[in-house]
Image (cartoon, rainbow, N blue to C red):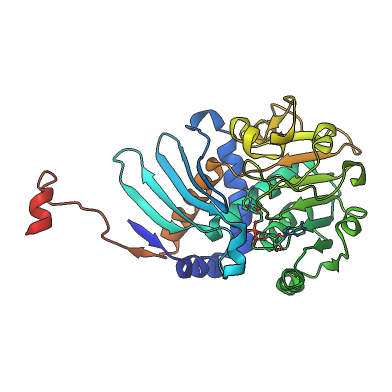
């Protein structure tokens, strides 16, 4: 079994390239979504506490089974910990043998950004170059880098309630050569964007802006609302947008659409990839990807990571499992 720690993943990203990984992951995700029916899919198993959520996210096809453990604790940052901590496991279906055990906080940020890029491919106007982001936390830089692979970002407007987050964000992205504008308010962002990412963390229902503040033609990628009781958008905005979700049974109670009184027509992202449905159909419609994070995205990320770790010979081979020479002599293997 291969073990990948944070240090291994950082080394792989140094060698392969972060931007290249995001690009490869976006394509891997598109390819996996195009074979949607081959996957065993289920909603994640979430255990809720007042201050956070602990989740298990399984997904499998005929050859591999994956699962991720991930939390969501918006209050962690004041304790000096990330809001999101995660580990993932990849298993060979033929034998049930786990082949990869890995740190997955970084991979979660990367796959979340790949979803944003893929959504923008089908939902943003083709000439989009101005991106706005509300919430400059752990996910934020990855979002911009992935979008740049799709859109050729030129201008970034950003805002956060925390000045330190905004300073960190602009410093981290300074080398990209984009025009960076620190907005004074959310309103100051909305006036001049093609694509808007909402990536705030609060364990409550928040309304970041009103529906009539969103200019026609904007594509919104809402990723901060990903749990029951945790949302970012006003319901009337969802009602007027072309709505895309990842996996409706899960999004229905975790996404922005949990706040709708009646069921709305929506498109699942895989339907756009397979060209079964059309995303944006006009320059002036508002499009919305109500992203909550789905286990198939983690499956794609784990598969790509495992292949690259093997190709670059990165990670540690660990004897973690009890595999006695005589498979029936587990006791002897332990005590002798
Ligand atoms: N949909 C998905 O697949 C997915 C994946 C990863 C994270 N998430 C969610 O995305 C959100 C961001 O994740 P993160 O890891 O960047 O969290 P984080 O805690 O690192 O950052 C969140 C940022 O939002 C800011 N913020 C909070 N309320 C705000 C407001 N009203 N206006 C402006 N800024 C505000 C905070 O100051 C912080 O800088 C979280 O809610 C997380 O649960 C979703």
Q: Residue at coordinates 73% horizontally, 41% vertically from top-left? A: 289
Instruction: Give the total number of marks visible in the rendering.
Output: 0
Q: Residue at coordinates 35% horizontally, 65% vertically from top-left? A: 316
Evaluate whether residue 122 shows in this view. Answer: no
Position of the N terminus by quadrant: bottom left
Question: Quarter of the image holding residue 290?
Answer: top right
Position of the C terminus by quadrant: bottom left
Residue situated in front as seen by the camera: 234 or 169:
234
Q: Residue at coordinates 65% horizontally, 47% vertically from top-left? A: 115
Residue situated in front as seen by the camera: 118 or 74:
74
Residue 32, given in percent of the width and then of the height, sits at: 55, 39
Classify 179 as above or below 244: below
Q: Residue at coordinates 48% horizontally, 67% vertically from top-left? A: 6
For ligand 1, give the image quadrant.
Answer: bottom right
Residue 47, given in percent of the width and then of the height, sits at: 49, 44
- Left or right: residue 288 versus residue 98 is right
Residue 117, given in percent of the width and then of the height, sits at: 70, 49
Question: Quarter of the image holding residue 313?
Answer: bottom left
- Left or right: residue 147 versus residue 33 is right
Residue 175, given in percent of the width and then of the height, sits at: 74, 73
Residue situated in front as seen by the camera: 17 or 96:
96
Evaluate whether residue 118 shows in this view. Answer: yes
Classify 290 as above or below 73: above
Residue situated in front as seen by the camera: 51 or 18:
51
């Amino acid at each position: 079994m291969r073990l990948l720690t944070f240090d291994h993943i950082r080394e792989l990203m140094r060698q392969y390239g972060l931007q290249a990984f995001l690009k490869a992951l976006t394509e891997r995700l598109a390819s996996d979504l195009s074979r949607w029916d081959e996957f065993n899919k289920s909603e994640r198993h979430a255990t809720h506490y007042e201050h956070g959520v602990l989740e298990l996210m399984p997904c499998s096809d005929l050859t591999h089974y994956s699962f991720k453990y991930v939390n969501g604790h918006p209050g962690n940052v004041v304790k000096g910990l990330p809001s999101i901590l995660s580990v993932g496991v990849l298993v060979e279906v033929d034998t049930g043998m786990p082949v990869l055990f890995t740190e997955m906080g970084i991979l979660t940020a990367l796959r979340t950004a790949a979803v944003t890029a893929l959504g923008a491919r089908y939902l943003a106007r083709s000439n989009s170059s101005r991106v706005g982001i509300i919430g400059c936390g752990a996910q934020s830089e990855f979002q911009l880098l992935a979008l740049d692979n799709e859109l050729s970002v030129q201008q970034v407007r950003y805002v956060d309630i925390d000045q330190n987050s905004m300073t960190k964000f602009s410093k981290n992205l300074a080398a990209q050569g984009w025009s960076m504008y620190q907005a004074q308010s959310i309103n100051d962002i909305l006036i001049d964007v093609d694509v808007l990412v909402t990536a705030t963390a609060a364990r409550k229902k928040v309304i970041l802006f009103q529906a009539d503040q969103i200019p026609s033609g904007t594509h919104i990628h809402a990723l901060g609302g990903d749990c029951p009781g945790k949302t970012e958008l006003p319901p009337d905005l969802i009602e007027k947008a072309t709505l895309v979700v990842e996996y409706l049974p899960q999004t229905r109670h975790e996404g922005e659409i949990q706040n709708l009184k009646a069921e709305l027509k929506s498109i699942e992202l895989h339907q756009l990839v397979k060209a079964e449905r059309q995303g944006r159909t006009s320059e002036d419609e508002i499009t919305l990807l109500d992203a909550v994070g789905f286990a198939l995205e983690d499956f794609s990320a784990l598969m790509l990571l495992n292949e690259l770790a093997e190709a670059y010979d990165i990670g540690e081979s660990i004897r973690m499992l009890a595999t006695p020479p005589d498979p029936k002599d587990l006791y002897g293997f332990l005590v002798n």
